Image (cartoon, coloured by chain):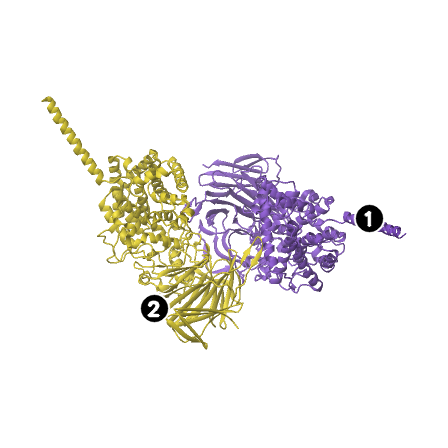
Chain colours: A yellow, B purple
């Protein structure tokens, strides 16, 4: 009996153990492993196996280890938030998020508990501080944070720190986890979402960061509520539809979908162009791609990389195409110059696009230049690809990147010369949300990594505290966003849409023609009918690769047609020093401002010529030891102005860069027709100057009564006559045209005619 | 009889042959071999033996061959002279001289008659044209040439072409040689000497070229008369002593020795500094060194490299020390920026200095950077040295280069920081002949290859035809030479010596102290008592390497003492963009010129602050992603001006560079005491800004009634107090000083005291 009782008890115990085991097993099935977001358990094993044999990965890991080891030695620093960007507490917390994320990775890859312990200790400090924090004392932001002056940076922190938490999740006890989640992560996510709806519930890169922050920590904790908020936004937010952010953009429009998926659907065009422009696209790229990776790893059923026909992967290619030959982004809209595909965001993006986007070996060449990888499966894939010598060149071709959620809101047209040395960027897109500039049909032009004609970019010194705490300067609005700050047409010294965001964001330019089928004569052409009511603008730019010129010739035809008389200005912002012009212009004993508002108040007038007779004006300048000549057709009473940025700039916030401004003071319609040559070179060591003169003799408009056509000619000094005719009413390829110009018949198919003959 | 008659005849013939042979033999003994100037018969054999095993030589040879082969294929071009520099005929004849010299070398080294034949054919064309030439049609030069607009270029031609002739001398028949010599070389040398005495018979780099041209062709033809003219000048020249050249310099002073040796004795100081400055020293270096090499090869008894205690070799070292970390020459006096030790002249100079100056292996590291050699014995020596891995680093240390034939006319003081990253160049030399600038006690300051405070250099675009035919622009006189264009003191808006060459060239500054014995506190100090009669100037500059600062600190004390009241200005020409200042300054709706003459008419006044109370004014700027701060002690009623170059510049000949100008409007004496920090960095990719603030709290002058001392202090933000005392009356090392300042006794030996304490 005793025995049997014992046996029964034993049986019961065994049964209980089985049930407990079953419960534990079931729990494990439903609970997720960690890490699982960016690093995965399987991925970590795979990486450990390859360590020491994959140079680019090994080097990145060694660098990260060195950096984190140094940082750990300095101790733990979690100061009470106080400063603006550039100040100590800001920079310190920013450094913390990077260090935590990296330390988490090191723990996983190197299996050294020192790193897990460090992450845990720092997080405990934050969990100690966070519940006591009110809003950040700096009041400048429309959405103040707690750790930083704006929620945006708080969101950044959580995107990175979630990864750190994921990495040490299994290292912590349940109690330790509960402590962190209750005191830090849950209230943190709540603050960023419900408590900051004007930040969280928009279509904006800020919100993307917010969504992803909440989503990432939600994925770590497997918190479905948070994950759903991240993906689909807040249902109720009570946002005032008249509310604007610090950049002057509306927070929200009526009936707007929000959340991560909406932020993926709307600002991205089907070509992967992000409407705010490449600088902010780059900035948003990290949360987009890292969250997509985390979703793919944890919720593969979402097929996030296939969303909207694979727009995330396309967006990486779009970004790579939006760079000059040094990898620097074209500073369209608000963009700080110098930002490039060497940024950490692009390292992630390229690695993830390679790994989850079909192992395109041309991406390996970019990764090779970056010379760093993300320390996860995607970085491993890159490292293995390079190690196995699969790298192929990434060739930047001419490409049009449509704007608008469905691709219908204009585009960015990029023409690249056959040899890829010259790049033209023409902008005929939508407004670009609150970071947009009023520069319809503007362009910039590059020779290798050097600007020939610049886009000014933004007026800001990001993270330099003395310059307005690193934030936007007031000159960003009074200068950088204004039309006259760009290489495009200005009517009556007013900006497009009168510089009003409400109007500008309702419109976009219309693509007319983008044809690169003939690499030796590429063309981009677009129309803008809303920038100035009653005035139609049509710009056509061509890159002609002709043996008669040392380098490709850029041709620019800016046509305008208004219902009343106006002044039209067309600036060209060049760099360097004027070598020669073929006009005798006035210059001044005192410099006056070119105007009083809309950016004109920031320009000094350095010289001016009122043109007598119709004439081809030429100006040659030297920049970076290369010569350039602008040749432009002018009419009697046109003006050629020499201007320089810097007026009304009491804090020296603006660069003193020069411009030529073509002016037609009182006209209803007409065209600015110009050609830009890049020629010759100067060597300060040999003191040899080559090909210092323009090869253009004359530009002429060919008289023509048929408003469906625009015709002009360029004669070279070697007596070659180039004739150009553009049909401005239809771009049909099959359409046959016959017109008579000056007694001569021209006959061709398609929208454009070009011919070269000897001039007699 | 018949037989014996024949035998006698035979005997006679044999005797005749013997005599003829003897004559020929004797002739050969007395006549010289060819080539013998730069290449030598023995050297050529030696080179041929090594070809294929000496990479740097082989590569240079291959490049030269490629270049000459391409050139030969284009045919022979000897156009009638017509154009200014930058024009076709000028550039063509210039190209010819280089090609001929190289083709001559190729003939010798490759033994391919094609090259000799080419040289001969081109020379025949010149011999055909030359006798018909009048003076060049361009009348701008004080010494017009025949092939070029100025004799200087004609001389260049002959220096190079003499070498070509030397190389093909033995390839030609006597008749062919006679033809060339009678029609080309003899009249050419006569034109450059007797017929152009104002060019030939001076102390000037122009004359050096003239002397060497005549000397080189004299050596080839073994023409003693020409050689003597070259070495010792013309005995009679009838030059008017009031005559000036195009740069405003006197042609000749009374009793002046002339010729090559005089040009070696006078403009070179015992330290190898050439009084015109490094840009022209570089230019003159080629004729100096190449003729020295030719003399050493043909007249070793002259011991030319030992002349004036080896000044030629010393001058090569002086030049190498007069460069920034990119090898670019400091643009002292007239100097075009960008010229560097990569120039062909320095390739020759370094090779020759190595070969004839004792095989200093540190020169090999410069040659390695140049990556080219002279194709002769000296280049072979370099190539062998490099191949044998003898290269050692060339370390640029702090060095003082005295000016004046005997070293008594001031100096250029160069301080370099311990890590060699920072370089200060202070000028307290003589006027520098006609290329001199009026900038006593001026300085420039470098960080690696980048200017922190610039010397403007010249106002000229050498060889760019559109800019005044490539010649000096009028702004060189109205701006670049003026005192206000430099970082030095200006009294009453007038240039030193009133900008008068006649006065300036009578004076030089006086070295006061150059002490680099403590590499952590290096000092240069000099006085100028003649620039403004009645005013004594004394500038002291220090580089302090202190752990309290991220980088070495530059301290500048510009002391002045006049017998009457004046306005004193001290400009600092910086680069980049202002980040912050600690003053609230005025700025303007219209820009006015800072003054009306002496260079002031070229400056726009962008901002101005009249100082209330004594104060340390600070201005921080960002240049090339590095921060810099100027801290300067100002007194009540002092002014701080923001200026920019570019006024009164109708042809855009000047760069729009900015300056701070410190002004003391009405004082008899005082001191500008300033400190310049280089700190932090900005990275446009990571957007991280480091150490963006100055570490200086305050600069103070320490009150002191003893006129023998100047005392000041610098307090850092970390409360360190640096005290400096300079004895301004004696530099004796052994001299003991005891003074009481503000109740505290200071006691030390030597001219200078510095101490660091904690500030309480």
> Percent x, y for residue B100?
65, 55
What is the residue that sits farthest to the right in this orientation? Answer: B1
Mark number displayed over residue A187: none
Mark number displayed over residue A533: 2
Q: Nearest the camera: A681 or A13?
A: A13
User: Does any portion of residue B407 appear in the rendered image?
Assistant: no
Q: Quadrant of the C terminus of chain B?
A: top left
| Dot 1 alpha-carbon crowd within 10 angstroms: few under 14, some 14 to 19, many 20 or more | few
Which of the two discs, 1 and 2, sits closer to the camera?
1
User: Does any portion of residue A353 appear in the rendered image?
Assistant: yes
Relative side of B699 to B143, left or right: left
Instruction: Give the image quarter of residue A702.
Output: bottom left
Considering the numbered disc 1 on the image, is that residue within a helix, a strand or a loop? Answer: helix
Q: Chain of mark 2?
A: A
Instruction: Give the image quarter of residue A27.
Output: top left
Relative side of B89 to A481, left or right: right
> Percent x, y for residue A133?
28, 42
Mark number displayed over residue B18: 1
> Do callouts 1 and 2 point to residues on the same chain?
no
Relative side of B387 to B252, left or right: left
């Amino acid at each position: 009996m005793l025995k049997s009782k014992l046996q029964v008890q034993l049986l019961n115990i065994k049964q209980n153990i089985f049930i407990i085991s079953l419960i534990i097993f079931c729990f494990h099935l439903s609970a997720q492993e960690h890490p699982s977001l960016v690093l995965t358990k399987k991925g970590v094993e795979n990486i450990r196996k390859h360590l020491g044999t994959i140079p680019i990965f090994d080097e990145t890991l060694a660098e990260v280890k060195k950096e984190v080891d140094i940082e750990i030695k300095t101790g733990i620093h979690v100061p009470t938030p106080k400063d603006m960007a550039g100040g100590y507490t800001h920079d310190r917390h920013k450094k913390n998020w990077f260090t935590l994320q990296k330390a988490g990775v090191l723990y996983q890859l190197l299996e050294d508990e020192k790193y897990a312990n460090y992450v845990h200790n720092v997080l405990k400090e934050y969990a100690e501080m966070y519940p006591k924090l009110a809003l950040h004392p700096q009041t400048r932001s429309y959405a103040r944070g707690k750790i930083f002056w704006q929620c945006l940076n708080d969101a950044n922190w959580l995107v990175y720190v979630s990864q750190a938490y994921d990495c040490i999740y299994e290292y912590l006890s349940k109690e330790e986890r509960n402590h962190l989640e209750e005191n830090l992560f849950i209230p943190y996510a709540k603050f960023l979402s419900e408590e900051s709806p004007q930040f969280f519930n928009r279509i904006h890169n800020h919100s993307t960061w917010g969504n992803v922050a909440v989503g990432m920590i939600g994925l770590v904790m497997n918190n479905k509520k948070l994950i759903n908020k991240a993906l689909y936004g807040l249902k109720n937010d009570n946002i005032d539809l008249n509310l604007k952010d610090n950049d002057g953009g509306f927070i929200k429009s009526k009936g707007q979908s929000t959340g991560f998926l909406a932020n993926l659907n709307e600002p991205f065009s089907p070509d992967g162009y992000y409407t705010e422009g490449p600088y902010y696209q780059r900035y948003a790229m990290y949360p987009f791609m890292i969250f997509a990776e985390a979703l793919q790893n944890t919720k593969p059923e979402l097929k996030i990389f296939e969303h909207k026909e694979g727009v995330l992967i396309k967006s990486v290619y779009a970004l790579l195409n939006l760079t000059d030959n040094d990898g620097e982004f074209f500073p369209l809209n608000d963009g700080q110059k110098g930002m490039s595909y060497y940024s950490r965001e692009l390292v992630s993006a390229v690695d993830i696009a390679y790994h989850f986007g079909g192992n395109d070996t041309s991406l390996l060449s970019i990764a090779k230049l970056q010379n760093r990888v993300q320390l996860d499966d995607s970085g491993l894939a890159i490292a293995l690809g390079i190690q196995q010598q699969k790298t192929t060149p990434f060739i930047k071709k001419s490409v049009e990147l449509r704007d608008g959620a469905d691709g219908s809101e204009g585009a960015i047209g990029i023409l690249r010369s056959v040899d890829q040395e010259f790049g033209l960027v023409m902008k005929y897109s939508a407004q670009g949300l609150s970071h947009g500039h009023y520069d319809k049909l503007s362009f910039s032009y590059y020779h290798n990594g050097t600007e020939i004609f610049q886009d000014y970019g933004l007026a800001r010194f990001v993270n330099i505290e003395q310059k307005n705490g690193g934030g936007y300067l007031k000159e960003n609005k009074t200068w950088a966003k204004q039309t006259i700050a760009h290489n495009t047409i200005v009517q009556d010294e007013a900006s497009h849409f009168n510089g009003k965001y409400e109007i500008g964001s309702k419109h976009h330019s219309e693509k007319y023609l983008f044809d690169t089928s003939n690499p030796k004569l590429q063309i981009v052409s677009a129309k803008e009918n809303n920038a100035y009511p009653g005035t139609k603008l049509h710009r056509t730019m061509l890159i002609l690769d002709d043996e008669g010129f040392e380098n490709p010739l850029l041709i620019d035809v800016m046509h305008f047609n208004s219902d009343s008389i106006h002044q039209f200005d067309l600036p060209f912002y060049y760099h360097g020093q004027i070598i020669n012009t073929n006009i005798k212009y006035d210059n001044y004993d005192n410099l006056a401002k070119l105007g009083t508002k809309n950016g004109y108040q920031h320009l000094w007038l350095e010289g001016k010529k009122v043109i007598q007779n119709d004439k081809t004006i030429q100006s040659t300048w030297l920049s970076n030891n290369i010569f350039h000549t602008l040749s432009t057709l002018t009419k009697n009473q046109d003006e050629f102005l020499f201007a320089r940025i810097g007026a009304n700039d009491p804090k020296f916030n603006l660069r003193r860069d020069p411009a030529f401004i073509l002016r037609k003071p009182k006209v209803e319609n007409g065209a600015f027709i110009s050609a830009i040559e890049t020629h010759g070179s100067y060597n300060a060591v040999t003191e040899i100057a080559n090909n210092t003169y323009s090869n253009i003799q004359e530009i002429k408009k060919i008289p023509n009564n048929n408003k469906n056509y625009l015709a002009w000619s360029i004669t070279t000094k070697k007596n070659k006559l180039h004739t150009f005719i553009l049909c401005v009413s239809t771009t049909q390829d099959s359409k046959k045209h016959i017109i008579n110009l000056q007694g001569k018949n021209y006959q061709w198919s398609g929208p454009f005619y070009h011919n070269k003959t000897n001039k007699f």
